[in-house]
Image: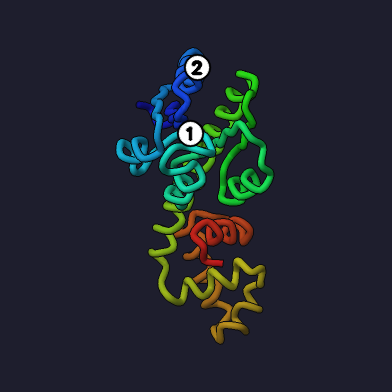
Amino acid sequence: MTHGRAVFVVDDDELMCEELAHLLLKVGYDVCAYPTADGFLADHPEPAGVLIVDLRLKGLSGLRLQQKLQGCGSVQIIFMSGVAHVEDAVAAMKAGAYEFLVKPFRPQTLIDAVSGAVERLRAGQVDKMHGDAAARAYQSLTEAEREIAHLIASGLRNKQVAHRSGRAESTVKVHRARVMKKMGVTTPVELARQLQWIGCV
């Protein structure tokens, strides 16, 4: 199953499961359907792809499934429900769901939602790659270079960095050049973005 095209449908309505799976297969997705959240988790403890799940299921509910998958950056969740309870939709969206659909919905509405969720997954994968590269580069900095990096990223000029760090301006210039080279950036703004990616600001 290709992660970029993987879609999981979890609904205890067998007919709904079949209809959604058929629809998504027709437009090119790899689809696996499950009648229970427990069955889905047993096969995919760390799923990668788009998860379409009914809010109310026998056994583990859709919201409880979302809680169990909290922090799993490789899955985007689309909720569906036959009843439009605002508080449920708000709870699902606050917890990171991509979309909340009220049954019955048009086939194109679902296709659009899945397409958007796939794009969000791809964007997240790109951000993760950038973050991983930035983290490796940051680890290569010396302690002094890290201190200088944070001061530069905050927008301070060499003279201000020298004053703040208690170093000579000439030393700051040397550190700055090394920081920029190791982090693969050319401007303080780019450096600040790298530090944000790895949660250092």
Relative image position of residue 187 (x, y in whole percent): 61, 58
Q: Amino acid at mark 2?
A: Glu
Mark in the foreground, 1 or 2: 2
Is 198 or 160 nearer to us in this picture? 198
Q: Looking at the picture, how far across and down is residue 29, in whole percent? A: 46, 21
Question: Would you call the spot at circle 1 few (<14 residues within 10 Å), some (14-19), or many (20 or more)?
Answer: many
Relative to 177, residue 109 above or below = above
Q: Is residue 161 above or below residue 34?
A: below
Q: Residue at x 49, y 54 (%)?
A: 184
Spot occupied by residue 164 in the image (x, y as percentages of width and height)? 61, 83
**Quadrant where the C terminus lies?**
bottom right
- Marks 1 & 2, CB-CB < 8 Å contact: no
Q: Which mark is residue 50?
A: 1
Q: Residue shown at 30%/36% (left/top)? A: 43
Does dot 2 land on a helix, a strand or a loop?
helix
Please report the residue visible at 42 percent of the width from the left and 50 percent of the height from the top.
Answer: 68
Q: Which residue is mark 2?
A: 19
Checking the image for residue 129, the label placed there is: none
- Residue lying farthest to the top in this orientation: 26
Label 2: how many Cα within 10 Å (few below 14, some 14–19, many 20+): few
The image quadrant where one finds the N terminus is top left
- Kindly give the residue lying farthest to the bottom in the view shown: 166
Report the amino acid beneath label 1.
Val
Query: Looking at the rendering, which quadrant does residue 38 occupy?
Result: top left
Residue in view at x 47 percent, y 51 percent: 67
Q: Secondary structure at mark 1?
A: strand
Q: Earlier in the sequence, mark 1 or mark 2?
A: 2
Residue sitting at the far front? 58
Q: Nearer the viewer, residue 198 or 46?
A: 46
Instruction: Measure the alpha-carbon separation of dots 1 and 2.
Output: 17 Å
Instruction: Tell me if I can see residue 28 in this picture.
Output: no
